[in-house]
Image (tube, rainbow, N blue to C red):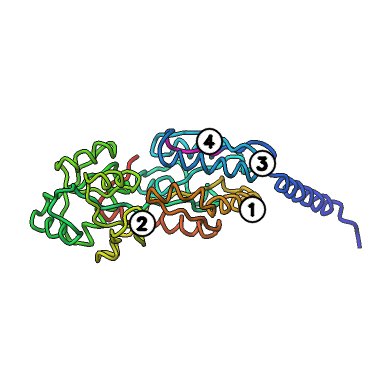
Amino acid sequence: MRFNFKLWLITLFTCTIAMTGAHASDAYPNRPIRLIVPYPPGGLADTFSRSLAKSISDKLKQPVIVENKPGANQVIGVESVLRAPADGYTMFLGSMTSLATNIGIYRQLTYDPAKDFSPVSSLFSSPLILTVRADLPAHNVEDLVALARKNPGKTSYASLGDGGSLHLASELFSQAADIKLLRVPYKGSVQALTDVMGGNITMIFDAGSTVIPQVEGKRLRALAVTGDKPIPALAGIPTMKQAGYPSVDISVWWGLVVRSGTPKPIVDTLNKAVKATLANPEFAQPFVGLGLTIESSSPEQFGNFMREEAKRWPAFMTKIGIQAQQ
């Protein structure tokens, strides 16, 4: 049999590349890792990310440096990650916004969440809490629905941007209860909550970290939560499913991703560190007290969830008439 020199060279080259990749993965990490957070410093997502970074750093024996890159509905943060190599040294705090709803907001999105990112793990989620001002004559969801039917088109809800979670939750509720609600957009939650508490706006769906202090201070009344189970911080408040509206099923979520093409052993190393972190009650408890659900997953589970959300929300946004921007 003749010796095929060309085939031998190809085989040698392939084996060398494979061994190099394996050694690189085995050595990971051997230098600092960046965690890109597409929010300004100081908020809930930033606080969570810094706690996560410290724990991962302790477990992997390398610094994990948080870099805040807010702006453009999280697109600035996304693009900074996609300019980095697919080597596991740049992680991204992905969210419902960057990995799902942006698909429906922008007609020409500069990235494809499914193709450009490899999932590492889910991290945390926040149900939205349906709240009204404390003295509104509505003590449960049915009272609010009756009020809205009595005043069609006059019962108002506070919303932030088009296609944001507050907007989507309110429209899900409007359809499920067959009521007409008046949308009033705001630039931020602070002014929106002020107007709800002041009686200018009837209702708002917002995250627990924002509304729980107002509920505890008797300035707002919580009627229901959108998650699949009640939250400890609001004992006795039912879920929307328990209140009779199971289709009002929305939680804002966050997860860890890296660039697609990152070697699987590196993804698995990061996943293991995340799982160990989130399983630690000392890490999780402060965030659970804010109404968050802390939960890790396998890369495959988080990838499946990302794909489902990336189909669900853009389709719903089209259904309720949100026009994609350029």
Location of the N terminus (image quadrant): bottom right
Secondary structure category for the residue under label 2 = loop
Q: Earlier in the sequence, mark 3 or mark 4?
A: 3
Residue that numbered label 3 is attached to: 61
Q: Residues within 10 Å of mark 4 (few under 14, many from 20)?
A: many
Q: Earlier in the sequence, mark 3 or mark 1?
A: 3
Q: Residues within 10 Å of mark 3 (few under 14, many from 20)?
A: few
- Is the stretch drawn in magenta largely helix, strand or loop? strand
Given the image, on which type of amino acid does mark 1 rest? Lys
Q: Earlier in the sequence, mark 3 or mark 2?
A: 3
Secondary structure category for the residue under label 3 = loop
Location of the C terminus (image quadrant): top left
Instruction: Kindly report which numbered mark, 1 or 2, lies closer to the viewer in this rendering.
Output: 2
Q: Which mark is residue 264?
A: 1
Please provide the residue range marked out in magenta: 35-39
x and y percentages locating residue 296 in the rendered image: 51, 55
Question: How far is the residue under mark 4 from the one under mark 2?
Answer: 29 Å
Q: Which mark is residue 66?
A: 4
Question: How far is the residue under mark 1 from the one under mark 2?
Answer: 35 Å
Give the residue drawn at x 38%, y 39%: 73
x and y percentages locating residue 56 in the rendered image: 59, 44
Q: Residues within 10 Å of mark 2 (few under 14, many from 20)?
A: many
Given the image, on which type of amino acid does mark 4 rest? Val
Residue that numbered label 2 is attached to: 231
Q: Are marks 3 and 2 in contact (CB under 8 Å)?
A: no
